[in-house]
Image (cartoon, rainbow, N blue to C red):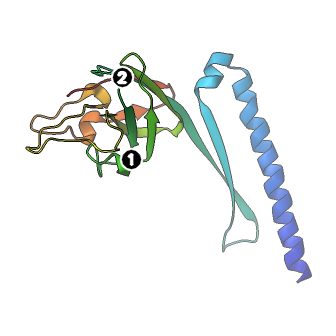
Amino acid sequence: MKNKLILAGLLFLIATTAFAQVMMDYKRPEESKPLEQRKKLTEFVKITVVRTNESDKPLLVKEVIKTNDIKVAVEGLRNSEGFVRIGLFDYADGFPETIQKASRVIVSTIENKKANVTFSKMPIGNYAIVVLHDENNNGLRDSSFFGFIKEGLGVSNNARGLWGSPSFDAAKINLGVQPQDLKIKIHY
């Protein structure tokens, strides 16, 4: 029992020392960059202590998760009624028809037929964005009795489908080390 407590204490000491060292190493390169560049890219450091079967020595695993912002400017709204619902998808399922399946959804007010939102600290990767002009604020894209769409929709890359909604791949953007500034036009 005493050996297990000593080993646990040792693992804790190693992990905290390694974390402090990683944090010191992490800050040094950032300090040499201009302040504006430091604000653009955020990194999260995740430290995991793994014990292997081959030895009693713990193995420290450092994983850096880089993030950035996606700014969306919505244009082409026919009026300032209701809200815009902006969904960020990281997979194709539900895109663009079912905004409830989005990874993140932001509901924004409309001013002067425009809206602006920011998806902050998103992990670097591929995304597609859909914007719904929800004029009556019911959370759905309304259509008439005959199936004609009543409310506007726009997607990233301003992609349009030939015989329907655009695909996830057509609307996909790649968020990298630079923030994304998107302009999405609403189509009715």
Question: What percent of the width, then of the height, locates residue 164?
Answer: 13, 39
In the displayed structure, 91 sits above or below 106; it is: below
Q: Are marks 1 and 2 in contact (CB under 8 Å)?
A: no
Query: Is residue 181 among what the camera can see?
Result: no
In the displayed structure, 159 sits above or below 32; it is: below
Residue at 23%, 30% in the rendered image: 159
Disc on the earlier residue, 1 or 2 = 2
| Front-lying residue, 176 or 187 | 187
Mark number displayed over residue 102: 1
Question: What percent of the width, then of the height, locates residue 3?
Answer: 88, 79
| Front-lying residue, 152 or 94 | 152
Quarter holding the N terminus is: bottom right
Mark number displayed over residue 80: 2
Decide if residue 83 is on the left or right side of residue 121: left
Element marked by disc 2: loop
Element marked by disc 1: loop
Mark number displayed over residue 177: none
Q: Nearer the viewer, mark 1 or mark 2?
A: 2
Q: Amino acid at mark 1?
A: Ala
